[in-house]
Amino acid sequence: MALVIAIVFAGVVLFAADRLLLWMESRGHINWRRKGRKKLAEEPTTGLDAMLSDTSHR
């Protein structure tokens, strides 16, 4: 009986975590299931990348 309770509890925790992450995704904080991953090749370079690049603007 304790095993059944533990499995049900684990299922409830996983469901709650999934709903929390979906809510956070709808707010724009993370990408979880619905938006997918960003393609890094299409992302603009950051300021740090620009500072460390070989071409200097001095």
Image: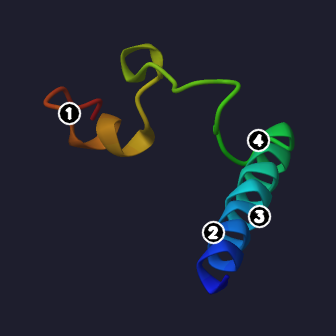
Tell which tag, 4 or 2, sits nearer the viewer. Answer: 2
- Structural crowding at the residue carrying mark 4, measured as other residues with C-alpha within 10 Å and reported as few (<14), some (14–19) or many (≥20): some
Asked which quadrant contains residue 15, the reply is bottom right
SS of the residue under disc 4: helix
Spatial CA span between label 1 and label 3: 49 Å
Amino acid type at circle 4 is Glu
Are the residues tagged 2 and 3 within 8 Å (C-beta)?
A: no
Tell which tag, 2 or 1, sits nearer the viewer. Answer: 2
Q: Which of marks 2 and 1 is nearer the N terminus?
A: 2
Spatial CA span between label 2 and label 1: 52 Å
Q: Mark 1 points at which residue?
A: 53
Q: Which residue lies furthest to the left in this view?
A: 54
Tell which tag, 4 or 1, sits nearer the viewer. Answer: 4
- Structural crowding at the residue carrying mark 3, measured as other residues with C-alpha within 10 Å and reported as few (<14), some (14–19) or many (≥20): few
Residue 7 image label? 2
Residue 10 image label? none
Q: Which residue is drawn at 29% across and 29% down?
A: 57
Residue 25 image label? 4
Residue 12 image label? 3
